[in-house]
Image: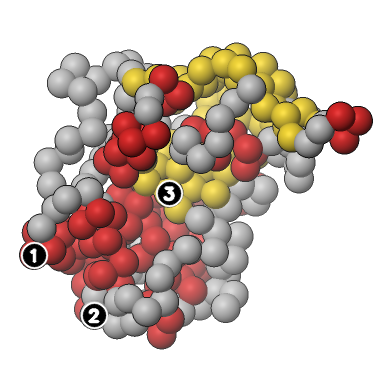
């Protein structure tokens, strides 16, 4: 993988700063506030879980941190850069180089192979195809999919597709990884494998932020932020992990060779 280009020479203490952010949707009487003056920070190497009921603002804050939408008020800094103080071109470059996205439905390109999907963001950023493929193969190897590199992603089971999506998100050593319900469409085994990979990415130094509604995934995080009606109702450090999660975290128990299922 390429040396990290995205972090400044002296990285800020916080990889992500969300400061007094509000966001509403709709117009007139139908206007509804999705986020209401929320603030938090995420440090490099930290895995933060964001949870809450449907409509609490989880996906909205993830979209804002990824620069996919603009807040009505407040600011968001990624690696010390004001995300919304940039031109469109500058913001797109920052997203490509600093932020990795993992989606519930993978958002892979079916007509490309696993390696081509992972290499694509590098090529879009100007990396030569040969170097991009080399980085893609290295990253796929890191998530246990080296032997599937040249298979069409449409032929892979859901668990494998999510691994490809994670590889695409982390190739080039992203500073921030944003994951929206990454285990929502997977069976239990594939979901555990996915959370393990995200945990390892945080341990490698990325700030990883996961939106989830599944309580069993929360112990993998360092912190859990709970939203309700667009407000933060709790922001707590994970003091104790479940016995199962501790065992997997401490022993590194992860089967990267077993076929994974999951919802198709």
Q: State the residue at coordinates (33%, 19%).
A: 80
Q: Residues within 10 Å of mark 2 (few under 14, many from 20)?
A: some
Q: Nearer the viewer, residue 192 or 241?
A: 192
Figure check: 150 above or below 64: below
Earlier residue among tags 2 and 3: 3
Q: Quadrant of residue 225?
A: top right
- Res. 60 in view: yes
Q: How far is mark 2 from mark 3, CA to CA?
A: 22 Å
Q: Position of residue 125 (x, y in %)?
A: 22, 49
Q: Position of residue 130 (x, y in %)?
A: 8, 65
Q: Quadrant of residue 128?
A: bottom left
Q: How far is mark 2 from mark 1, CA to CA?
A: 14 Å
Q: Quadrant of residue 183?
A: bottom right
Q: Which mark is residue 101?
A: 3
Q: Residues within 10 Å of mark 1 (few under 14, many from 20)?
A: few
Q: State the residue at coordinates (48%, 67%).
A: 190
Q: Position of residue 22 (x, y in %)?
A: 66, 22
Q: Position of residue 129 (x, y in %)?
A: 13, 63
Q: Which mark is residue 130?
A: 1
Q: How far is mark 3 from mark 1, CA to CA?
A: 23 Å
Name the residue at the bottom extreme.
Answer: 155
Q: Secondary structure at mark 1?
A: helix
Figure check: 247 above or below 227: below
Q: Residues within 10 Å of mark 3 (few under 14, many from 20)?
A: many
Q: Which mark is residue 185?
A: none
Horizontally, residue 130 falls left or right of residue 38, namely left
Q: Which residue is mark 2?
A: 150
Q: Nearer the viewer, mark 3 or mark 1?
A: 1
């Amino acid at each position: 993988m390429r040396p990290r280009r995205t972090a400044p020479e002296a990285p800020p203490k916080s990889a992500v700063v969300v400061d007094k952010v509000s966001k509403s949707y709709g117009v007139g009487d139908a206007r509804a506030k999705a986020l209401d003056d929320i603030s938090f920070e995420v440090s490099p190497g930290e895995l933060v879980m964001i949870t809450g009921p449907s409509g609490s603002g989880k996906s909205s804050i993830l979209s804002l941190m990824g620069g996919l939408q603009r807040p009505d008020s407040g600011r968001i800094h990624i690696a010390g850069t004001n995300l919304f103080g940039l031109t469109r071109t500058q913001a797109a470059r920052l997203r490509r180089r600093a932020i990795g996205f993992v989606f519930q439905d993978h958002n892979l390109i079916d007509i490309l192979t696993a390696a081509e999907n992972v290499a694509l963001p590098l090529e879009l950023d100007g990396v030569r195809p040969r170097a991009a493929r080399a980085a893609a193969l290295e990253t796929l190897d890191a998530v246990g999919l080296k032997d599937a590199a040249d298979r069409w992603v449409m032929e892979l089971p859901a668990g494998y597709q999510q691994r490809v999506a994670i590889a695409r998100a982390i190739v080039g050593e992203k500073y921030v990884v944003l994951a929206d319900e990454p285990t929502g469409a997977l069976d239990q085994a594939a979901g555990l494998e996915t959370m393990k990979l995200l945990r390892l990415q945080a341990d490698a130094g990325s700030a990883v932020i996961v939106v989830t509604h599944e309580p069993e995934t929360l112990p993998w995080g360092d912190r859990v932020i709970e939203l309700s009606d667009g407000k933060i109702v709790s922001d707590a450090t994970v003091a104790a992990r479940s016995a199962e999660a501790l065992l997997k975290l401490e022993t590194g128990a992860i089967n990267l060779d077993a076929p994974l299922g999951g919802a198709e």
